[in-house]
Image (cartoon, grey):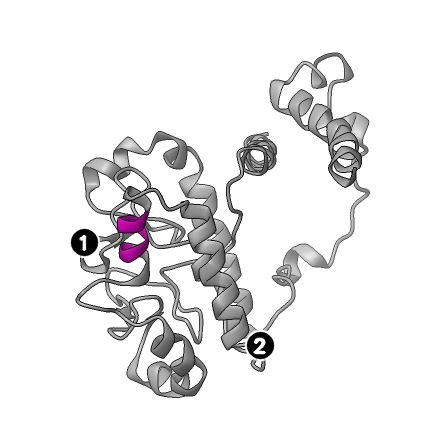
Amino acid sequence: QKFVDTILKSIVHHVQLKLEGGIEYEYYHALCELCSAISTPSKTLTRCTGCELVSYCSKKCIKEDKINHRDICKNFSVKNGKNIFTIGQEKRKMGKNWNKYLIDLHNQASEITKDSHQVDIRMFLGPRMCPICKETRSNMLKDCVCCCVAYCSEEHRLKDKEHLVSCEEMELCVQVYSYRQRRHLETVPVPSHIDHVYKPLPSMRDCTDPNSFLRNADVASILRDDWLTEKIAILSER
């Protein structure tokens, strides 16, 4: 039930992001850019000093990714001690639209790397930034264990109540993602002691109580948003 609730909340959150004009992304800051190794207390990652956009787990990965990363690092380099997100925050304070700034960066990066299929540019839509105070200076941030967000202090980490609710599940997601990437797998294999017996799957009726299912606020929101999506799409085409 906890897993189902988490999925429902995640879907509703994405719908809210779309309605509010937010940007969706799937990018883990605390993974090695080349091999997707996870940053741990015993093995921390090293951020690229040229651009502060990506991290690496070893000198070997830095060397092997040098050619792929070169153009991004050159065009989005740190200037006067400020990375592109810190510069963007300064522009934001002067009235620049933050989402438009990120989209412009992403489009620019897409053009620069259009001939390469090995460069991940999702970091431009999901900047490494404290969600509480919007701090973007790399040396001031510490990645959360889930690798999805960074904070400038423990105080601000605890203040982010929304993230605390889903942090544990997100940490599991990044572990699965890292495992798949490092082993070049489409899906995570099921252990053989589980996979050798195939039991009948339960029906939806077994999993839900028809009398209470639709009373769930999250479910109701999803059904309502699904109904509205088609209408909104039609109106937007006019």
Q: Quadrant of the N terminus?
A: top right
Q: Give me the residue at 49% from left, 55% from top.
A: 103
Tag 2's secondary structure?
loop
Q: Choose top left, top right, bottom left or bottom right for residue 191.
A: bottom right
Q: Which of marks 1 and 2 precedes in the sequence?
A: 2
Task: Name the main secondary structure of what is drawn in magenta.
Answer: helix
In the image, the segment drawn in magenta is: 86-91
> Whole-percent x and y of residue 41?
24, 60
Q: Give me the residue at 30% from left, 79% from top.
A: 58
User: What amino acid does circle 1 point to?
Assistant: Met
Mark 2 lies on residue = 114
Q: In the rendered view, would you say 27 is above or below 72?
A: above
Mark 1 lies on residue = 140
Q: Does residue 220 appear left or right of residue 112 in this picture?
A: right
CA–CA distance in space, label 2 to label 1: 32 Å
Q: Quadrant of the C terminus?
A: top right
Tag 1's secondary structure?
helix
User: What amino acid does circle 2 point to?
Assistant: Lys
Q: Give me the residue at 25% from left, 39% from top.
A: 133
Q: In the rendered view, would you say 62 is above or below 107?
A: below
* Residue 94 disc label: none
Nearest to the eye among marks 2 and 1: give it: 2
> Whole-percent x and y of residue 55?
33, 69
